[in-house]
Image (cartoon, helix red, strand yellow):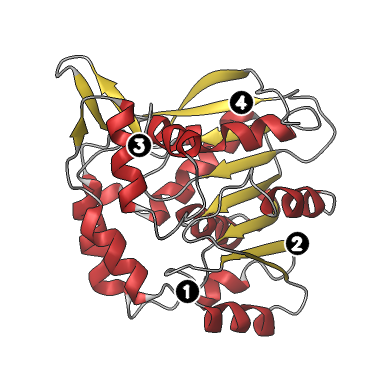
Amino acid sequence: MNAPLAAYRECFFQSRDGLSLYYRDYGDPQAAATPVLFLSGLTRNAKDAHIAASRLAPQRRVLAMDYRGRGRSAYDPDWHNYNPGVYVGDVVQLLAAAGIRRVAIIGSSLGGLCAMGLALVAPDALAGAVLIDIGPKIAGAGRERIGDYVGVELRVASLEQAADHLSRQYAHAYPDWDRALWLAMADATFVFDPAAGNYRLDYDLRLGAALEEQAAGEAALDLWPLYRALRDMPVLAVRAELSDILDAETFEKMAEDMPKLTRLVVPNCGHVPLPHREPLASAIDDFLRRV
């Protein structure tokens, strides 16, 4: 039986450069267990974490953040600030605002990169990390696929139409999904625009320009030192069996480079596995017992 969805507190904090950024705060702030922070993928937001956060909230405090330019966080007037280095700084500010000294991060795609970045700049703040379908080398096919759609405007008349679009766009990644799952993804991906009377993507489309600029230098960027910053803490690395972002060769090298690494391959799934679905949900439970 599925656990009931949890209530959460809606909170805002201010970034170092003055933006109002949003996060959800679940569970008891005084819980003894290590708090958890969910960090989403590139164009995603805190809504993605709701079911997984609800599962964990009875035992611990759980946060889920909207990056700048996504969801209910302010859009940055300078799109050059849509980069992982700035996001890591925002995470540091979030932890200070929430009064959290040490946290475990469950990071999907970009969120995993941010976990690596936090390990580098503030290792004492990180108790451990779950890296969901991301590693120190990003496969070219996945990078190109994401670059083709990020920043492209898309509007639909209803969430039903949004679900139709998503089921076509991501059929390769979620071949076994039913209609309910596509509708849930649509609700987390789109937001109603009352001025236009339709639904739009729930992020700043200028993110596409930032991604294009970063991709130009990404191929020469060595992310292995960033990954190695996690060596002294518990890490669960997750690969989707059908992933075009984290290839099998890189996944093997990650284990060779970090002998204590715990790994999981999610079958019949592409980029990215959802943290509330099995077998990942149980693997996260096991991981959190160690942090």
Q: Give the number of the disc on residue 117.
A: none
The residue wearing badge 1 is 223
Q: Which amino acid does label 2 sit on?
A: Pro
Quarter of the figure with residue 72: top left
The residue type indicated by label 4 comes to Asp
Marks 3 and 4, Cα distance to the nearest angstrom? Answer: 28 Å
Q: Nearer the viewer, mark 2 or mark 3?
A: 3
Q: Which mark is residue 163?
A: 3
Return the x and y of residue 241 as percentages of the image width and height. Answer: 55, 69
Q: Nearer the viewer, residue 246 or 84?
A: 246
Q: Does the residue at mark 4 contact the one at mark 1 (Cβ under 8 Å)? A: no
- Residue beneath disc 2: 234
Give the number of the mark in front: 1 or 3: 3
Q: Camera-side residue: 266 or 217?
A: 266
Q: Quadrant of the N terminus?
A: top right
Q: Of 149 and 108, which appears nearest the observer? A: 149
Query: In the rendered view, would you say 98 is above or below 215?
Result: above
Q: Which residue is drawn at 47% across and 67% down?
A: 243
Q: Sort mark 4 into few (<14), some (14-19) or many (20+) by Cα contacts within 10 Å.
A: many
What is the C-alpha distance between the residues marked 1 and 2?
Answer: 19 Å
Give the amino acid at mark 1. Leu
Would you place residue 44 above or below residue 143 in this image? Answer: above
How far is mark 4 from mark 1, CA to CA? Answer: 31 Å
Helix, strand or loop at mark 3: helix
**Residue 282 percent across, percent down from the top left:** 76, 50
Q: Is mark 2 on a helix, strand or loop?
A: loop
In the rendered structure, which amino acid carries the disc numbered 3?
A: Ala
Q: Which residue is drawn at 60% across and 37% down?
A: 95
Asked if residue 112 lies left or right of residue 15, the reply is: right
Circle on res. 25: 4
